[in-house]
Image (cartoon, rainbow, N blue to C red):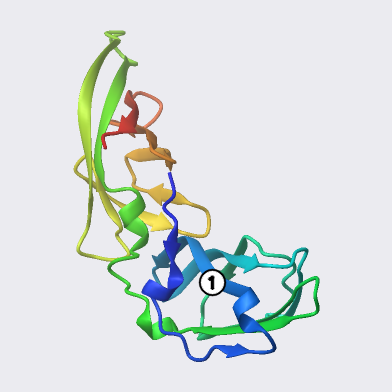
Amino acid sequence: MRSIIILIALISITSLKCCNHSNDISSEIVVNRLIYYPEDSISLEFELSIEAEYEPYSLQWIKPDTFKGTGPFTVNINEDLLIDVLISDAEGYQFEFIQVIQKDTIDSLKYDYRTLYYGEYDCKVFYDDYFYGNDTSYNTIVTVSRDEDFFTALIIHGNPARFDYLTGYFYHPRLRGRFFSDDSINFRIWNSPEPIFDIWSYRGKKIE
């Protein structure tokens, strides 16, 4: 699930400059996703919402000049990001939308990347007793919480796991798996070194 939020609520508008008949055209940035990762890395996915009285309209992106259309666009914010686009409608009226996304105004706690994952998950557990063959299954609640260490990331079922935000994987010596996909969790716990080991496989959905 993704929530749509208006970026104006998150950052300040540096300037808004209009050309002729600006009341006939309006635009705003709509954020689909904003995530603050370790090492001061910020991922932003947004699109441009446009209302024009005289359609069709055309866009000329000035900054970033590689953008086309209304998005969605995904950018990494390493510094303040300038959004500058010239919108022209079918009657030749123009509106230049200029907004600066100020990096320092993005709340690292509010948009902490771990917010997507922490909570409780209703899981089905499959236990594979490799040595004795006493396989079984049962249901349990798995709690995922944020660790105080930003880089340690999450406490998954009592196990602190590190996160590689470039691959989307969490790491722990006894835990394996991609862990999270949307609102689902899927991982395994190894209890002993190979080749003789017990395995608990956890699969479940996040409890809203």
- Figure quadrant of residue 194: top left
- Does residue 63 show up? no
* Of 183 and 147, the residue lying toward us: 183
Residue 174 in view (yes/no) = yes
Q: Amino acid at mark 1?
A: Glu
- Quadrant (top left/top right/bottom left/bottom right) for the N terminus: top left
Is 135 placed above or below 145 here?
above
Instruction: Name the residue rendered at 78%, 63% in the picture.
Output: 56
User: Quick check: 206 above or below 6?
Assistant: above
115 displayed left or right of 88: left
Q: Position of residue 179 (x, y in %)?
A: 40, 40
- Identify residue for label 1: 28
Q: Horizontal placement of 35 versus 26: left or right?
A: left
Between 171 and 144, the one nearer to me in the picture = 144
- For label 1, the SS is strand
Q: Position of residue 155 (x, y in %)?
A: 23, 49
The part of the image, by quadrant, that contains residue 141 is top left
